[in-house]
Image (cartoon, rainbow, N blue to C red):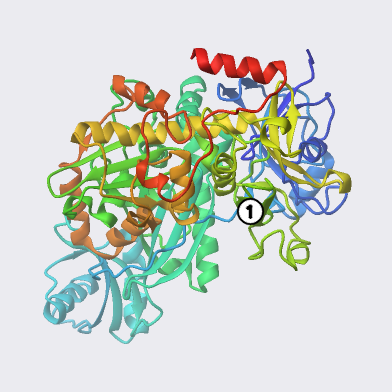
Amino acid sequence: MTTDPLVVFTPSGKRGHFPVGTPVLTAARQLGVDLDSVCGGRGICSKCQITPSYGEFPKHGVTVSDGALSEWNAVEQRYDDKRGLKPGRRLGCQATVQGDVVIDVPPESQVHRQVVRKAATARAITMDPATRLYFVVVEEPDMHSPTGDLERLERALREQWQIDAVTADLSLMSKLQPVLRKGKWEVTVALHKGHKDPVARIVEIWPGLHESGLYGLAIDLGSTTIAAHLTDLETGEVKASSGLMNPQIRFGEDLMSRVSYSMMNPGGDQEMTKAVREAINDLTTSIAEEAGIDADLIVETVFVCNPVMHHLLLGLDPVELGQAPFALATSESMSLPAREMDLTNMNPRAQVYILPCIAGHVGADCAAVALSEEPGKSDDLVLIVDVGTNAELLLGNTSRVLACSSPTGPAFEGAQISSGQRAAPGAIERIEIDPVTKEPRFRVIGSEKWSNEEGFDQDVATTGITGICGSGIIEAVAEMRIAGLVDESGLIGSAEQTGTSRCVPEGRTHAYLIHDASAEGGPRITVTQGDIRAIQLAKSALYAGARLLMDEMKVDKVDRVVLAGAFGAHISTKHAMVLGMIPDAPLDHVTSAGNAAGTGARIALCNIAARAEIERVVREIIKVETAIEPKFQEHFVAANAIPHKTDPFPELAQVVSLPSPTFNAGGGDEEKSGRRRRRRS
């Protein structure tokens, strides 16, 4: 057993042992980690910036000490003096491995930047924002009427707009008088008045008629990605949508890993809070630049997030969410100044609204989905599935609405998959396998062509074919089942059993070869037995959560299914059902809602009545706790089969014919013993 230090890279999850003194950049290249460098490791280009993390990481089975990397050297100091490095950053070409270490590769250091697939969904929203613009003409000061400028501005708002009272903080007061005089007593003010606020607050003031707009951010803060929509507060138009990886991934890919990190590392929660707030500040700056607006015009932000992200965003230790009874510090909505959360790259007086949480494992993101999709107003029984690293499910109609969460893990995001990667140019995102020839064809992000179409090679010449992302691995496993390469239990057959040489031995199991560029120094992309198991675990948790809600509702089927989030927009309903990710339903009754959580955030941003409505609705939603429900495990085990051990899936059978549940062809002793084990089970 090697004694060389273990190096774990996030967000890719790739790991390996390397001798002491190995440059981090060298380790990354040997593992196929997406770490950029154009200067040949001379510390000139700064493309290979990395962030080491220290402390205990139960998820990775490693403890990182302070001396895990070599000391800061003269090359790094020279670069820092000339151009500056963010606190905690190192140059991967200069830092060398000295001990076990967890290393985060930030988005700007990745050659293939992730595509954050949470674009804004078109939606008609009644505009009634909390922050509005008002143009007023203010009476000039008079020695015979000794009132202050703020009082005369307040009088103008009352007389011209019937606004009874306003408040202003000191930072606004310091610019009030110069702006009034510059505007010759004609000014535009931005007033913020939430649905619970007794009086309006002056957020900003401009001389004359302000015509440069007023904007807000709707942010879906997920475990893996942070997606933001810059929205015009006068029209509701989305001016720009952008996103980035949640930097907390380096502390753990799933929520419980981050709770564990907080438990085992004093101050770990503050470390994660700082990381995510800095990322939001960076995202705010970049999205304003993309839209071509001044970031000071962003005066309001609405957040939706799961409970652990909720606590870490607010600077609250999430430790109680890691153990029964999973108590939230608060489940109510929150309204507070952005500066209290160190969100400094927007207007200094910007306000934040965070939607309420439903329960300890069902957060504000699920509330936002409920606001967007309104299951409580549906006449038919609808199941809404929002899949990420943690899945939230809603089941309901006009009679009642149930909610639960399921720990699907990061496999659907392409993590914990042998050739897996985040969604980025070059990643396989779609795949089809001919059921007769067993030959695959696929599409990669960045090209509209299939791999067997003319011009495909030219399309991918720049990005290459780098791996397989979440949507790709889901379709690959489903297609393998349809083509008879995988049996009901999830076992990949041998070449003899399946009739294709693409099923290659891998240790004591087999793998299916999708693409092999190893002769040219490229990747060899396969679906391994371990990949199948990871997808089985994820989809079983998702299905078990849905069945638990159906048990509570005392039904055996649902009328329709709504797939929310990036998952819903990029996975075909047929493949989802072949895998058994969702209960059986007519395929034309399974639809995509796009980024429903982000849409709910935009609704709350643009309409304050919607905030009051969702605060009422969450109190009526019934929470089902999967962590303590005995039947969850029963459903989970049955759902391990593809598509399911006991559910016949009659609607699916009308669309696709699945091969025999087990392989019938001969094989080696290993395959035979595997079949015997399955029969005994």
SS at badge 1 = loop
Q: Which residue is mark 1?
A: 424
Residue 407 appears in the picture as rendered: no
- From the viewer's perspective, is residue 534 above or below residue 286? above
Q: Is residue 611 left or right of residue 270?
A: left
Question: Residue 178 location, x and y as percent?
Answer: 37, 76
Q: Is residue 665 left or right of residue 604?
A: right
Q: Is residue 675 left or right of residue 610?
A: right
Q: Residue at x 37, y 28 (%)?
A: 646
Q: Residues within 10 Å of mark 1 (few under 14, many from 20)?
A: many
Residue 101 appears in the picture as rendered: yes
Q: Is residue 200 left or right of residue 75?
A: left
Q: Which of the 4 image quadrants contains residue 664?
A: top right
Question: Residue 146 location, x and y as percent?
Answer: 16, 75
Q: Which of the 4 image quadrants contains residue 400?
A: top left
> Of 73 and 572, which appears nearest the observer?
572
Q: Which of the 4 image quadrants contains residue 626?
A: top left
Q: Amino acid at mark 1?
A: Ala
Q: Residue at x 13, y 79 (%)?
A: 145
Question: Residue 651 location, x and y as percent?
Answer: 36, 46
Quadrant (top left, top right, bottom left, bottom right) of the N terminus: top right
> Of 145 and 87, which appears nearest the observer?
87
> Of 308 and 253, which appears nearest the observer?
253
- From the viewer's perspective, is residue 321 above or below residue 3? below
Question: Residue 267 location, x and y as percent?
Answer: 49, 27
